[in-house]
Image (cartoon, helix red, strand yellow):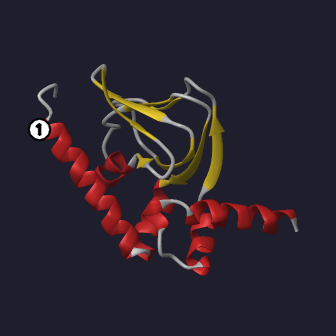
Amino acid sequence: MEDDLAMDQKQTMLSSVPLFAGLGSRDLGRIARLCDEVDVRSGFVITREGASASEFFVILAGRIGIDRGGQHLRDLGPGDYLGEMALLAKGPRTATATALEPTRLLVLTRPEFNELLLDFPKIQAAVLRTMAARVMTLETDPRH
């Protein structure tokens, strides 16, 4: 019974994430089973620039700072996600992500992330659009 309650709560949280907007409860349930919830403290380094990558993160609550080459790029908050570039490119992390306050994340490993993209073309398109926008920002930013 507790597991059902926890799964319902996770589905409710997922439904508030723009990346998953428009998905029905059955699809949200499938996604909820794929991911884990993790709470991190302020100051926790979630990803480190240059490190190998094996997870994708969706921010449920809190705020994360994104830095590259020692320069602050942006802050991310609830509904934002990170980690897709390194997973899709099968390369190292392109930035360091640090929790700026206590933060709750949904975490998908590489196989789960790939399953998500294969099973949900709408999510795949949204992730690819975000990745392209981030690459364009890096290419046009005079700091990089």
Q: Is residue 24 left or right of residue 6?
A: left
Residue positioned 31% across, 68% down in the render? 125
Name the image quarter holding residue 24: bottom right
Q: Alpha-carbon neighbours of circle 1 within 10 Å: few (<14), some, or many (≥20)?
A: few
Q: Is residue 70 left or right of residue 41?
A: left
Q: Residue furthest right?
A: 1
Q: Quadrant of the N terminus?
A: bottom right
Q: Is residue 106 above or below residue 26?
A: above
Q: Is residue 136 above or below residue 11?
A: above
Disc 1: which residue? 140
Q: Is residue 131 above or below residue 20?
A: above
Q: Position of residue 80 (x, y in %)?
A: 44, 49
Toward the viewer: 108 or 133?
133
Q: Position of residue 71 (x, y in %)?
A: 28, 22
Q: Is residue 4 above or below residue 136?
A: below
Toward the viewer: 8 or 110?
8
Q: Amino acid at mark 1?
A: Thr
Q: How many marks?
A: 1
Q: Position of residue 76 (x, y in %)?
A: 43, 40
Name the image quarter holding residue 26: bottom right
Q: Position of residue 78 (x, y in %)?
A: 51, 47
Q: Is residue 19 left or right of residue 28?
A: left
Helix, strand or loop under label 1: helix
Residue positioned 63% across, 53% down in the render? 36
Name the image quarter holding residue 144: top left
Residue positioned 51% across, 59% down in the render? 17
Q: Residue furthest top?
A: 70
Residue positioned 30% across, 54% down in the render? 130
